[in-house]
Amino acid sequence: MTTFPEIVLGPTGEVLDLPFGVFTVRISGEQTAGALSVVDSVLAPGALGAAPHIHHAHEEYFLVTTGEVTFDTADGELAIGPGGSVSVPRGRPHGYRNATTSPATLTTIFTPAGYETYFREIAAEAAAGTPITPELLNELRAKQHTTPWP
């Protein structure tokens, strides 16, 4: 049985300024003994949140809170509006983007936790002035057992 730390009440979250949006780690794996993490994202109009990829070590659950987010899956393209959700089991290809002219926000739950580290690494690279290329993103994703698709 997983043992969680005491209830932790903290600040509003860890804000990460990424080239494709502002991501806020609301609940980290450190707070849940690795069970899950929760990240809020604000995607600018036209932003690519994530190129299509496959996670081999965790699941993702998305809840669109404002705007519209387009998910690219093996089954096709899905445009999801406020209140809509998408569940992505490990091993299933997916990507997402804001194809509209208005900002979009979403909350993502990762089980188990750990993928928030990927966002932290992108933020650190961007802050250091490193160009954020698809190759760099694939390298950072690989550390999280994630591969590009197709």
Image: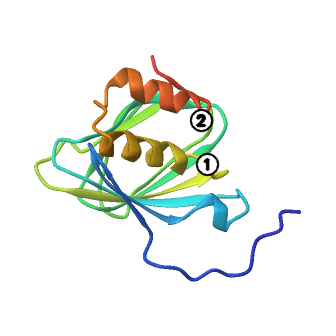
Residue 76: x percent and y percent? 38, 29
Question: Up-down: is 147 above or below 71?
Answer: above
Q: Residue at x 40, y 45 (%)?
A: 124
| SS category of the residue bearing label 2 | loop
Whether the residues at callouts 2 and 1 have beta carbons within 8 Å, the answer is: yes
Question: Up-down: is 144 above or below 37?
Answer: above
Report whether 37 appears left or right of 103. Answer: right
Report whether 107 appears left or right of 126. Answer: right
Residue where numbered disc 2 is placed: 144
Given residues 84 and 22, the one toward you in this image is 22
**Colour theme:** rainbow
Which kind of residue does numbered mark 1 sit on?
Answer: Gly
Given residues 58 and 88, the one toward you in this image is 58
Q: How many marks?
A: 2
Residue 82: x percent and y percent? 31, 62
Q: How far apart are marks 2 and 1 (CA)?
A: 8 Å
